[in-house]
Image (cartoon, rainbow, N blue to C red):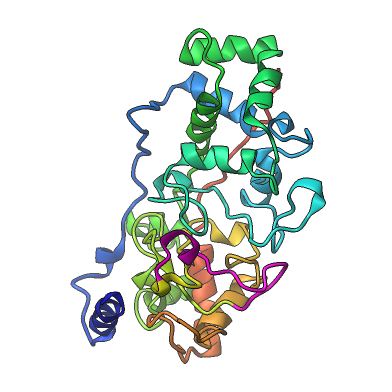
Amino acid sequence: MRKLIIAIIFGILLAPVAWASEDSVYEPVPEMQHPADNKWSEEKEELGKMLYFDPRLSGSNWISCATCHNPGLGWGDGLPRTIGDGQKELGRHAPTIINSGYFEVQMWDGRKKTLEDQAKGPIGAAVEMNQDFDELVRELKALPGYVKRFAAVFGKNSLTIDNIAKAIATYERSIVSKNSPYDYYWRGDKSAMSVSAVKGMNLFFGKAKCGICHNGPAFTDSGFHNIGVKAAGPLKVDLGRYNISKDDFDKGAFKTPGLRSISQSAPYMHNGTEATLDDVIEFYDRGGDVKENLSPFITPLGLTAQEKKDMVEFLKALDGEPIEVIFPDLP
């Protein structure tokens, strides 16, 4: 039934249509929303920033959140597949955390529903940061600076793994890409994007069909699709979302990444198989590489060489204003 529904939607989206207006596809980045049980405060965000950059959150005391999600590398790590505990290569690419506060689910397979839950995942994962939660709490309680800050933010005797995660998630929600040339273009400055980028935008939402999955203010449907990525790295087979849903339809499907500031976080795909944005466009133009269980959305595009260049220029026009980061003094 799901395949039938997808096929019907696919047919509708590919039927000859005329957009009501070009700006019908534009959605500005909204104000970040915080959960009712983890409301924002400046002090909480600052505490989360300290924890994010603190390698003591790992069992080895070498790996911090910023090791794999480095602001200098587009909030990723610049590697095809990330390196975990014991310098072992893992099976997937470290996704950027830019705009992750807008995502409906977290991780490539969507196994974490919130940033708070996601923050605890890598810390406790044996192959990633390999930290025992109880040991981490003991270590941080031995640091008066952290005890004081947790008390100020969460109350007395509040240094717990759940509050560690809440603080980190609060900081991560501050990492937002906005005010890109694309935004300025739709605010009325038609010189903000080059002629090539504008052509690429029209291709993105038209012939290239990218807007089917990359839509909304963060350019993601937060859905899961098998786009035909070939295997690479230590995982010869990665079933992706299927490992969570156990639905055959999800075999090889991974979460649609957001595209704002995407030029800063190469390489691409869930396992880093495409080194550049040019490679990504070539990948989609040929209709993916692995045809088994391929999404019906993925078909050869027939782009010209110039159209491919225009597409890349549009993706670069999604780069937001610089996200400035001052490294915190740690307790």
Near-viewer residue (322 or 66) = 66
Residue occupying image coordinates x 35% and y 74%: 205
Image check: 72 left or right of 193? right
Asked if one can make out residue 319 in the rendered structure from this viewpoint, the answer is yes
Which residues are drawn in magenta?
230-247
Within the magenta stretch, is there residue 245? yes
Near-viewer residue (20 or 241) = 241
Q: What percent of the width, then of the height, locates residue 306?
A: 53, 85
Above or below, 108 against 160 in this view is below
Within the magenta stretch, is there residue 212? no
Q: What percent of the width, then of the height, locates residue 315?
A: 50, 66
Above or below, 171 against 312 in this view is above
Q: What percent of the width, then of the height, locates residue 98?
A: 52, 48
Q: What percent of the width, then of the height, locates residue 161?
A: 56, 27
Residue occupying image coordinates x 42% and y 77%: 199
Where is the N terminus found, in terms of image quarters?
bottom left
Secondary structure of the magenta portion, mostly? loop
Image check: 76 left or right of 104? right
Residue occupying image coordinates x 51% and y 90%: 304
Q: Going by the picture, which residue comes out furthest to the left?
A: 20
Where is the C terminus found, in terms of image quarters?
top right
Above or below, 139 against 276 in this view is above
Residue occupying image coordinates x 68% and y 31%: 57
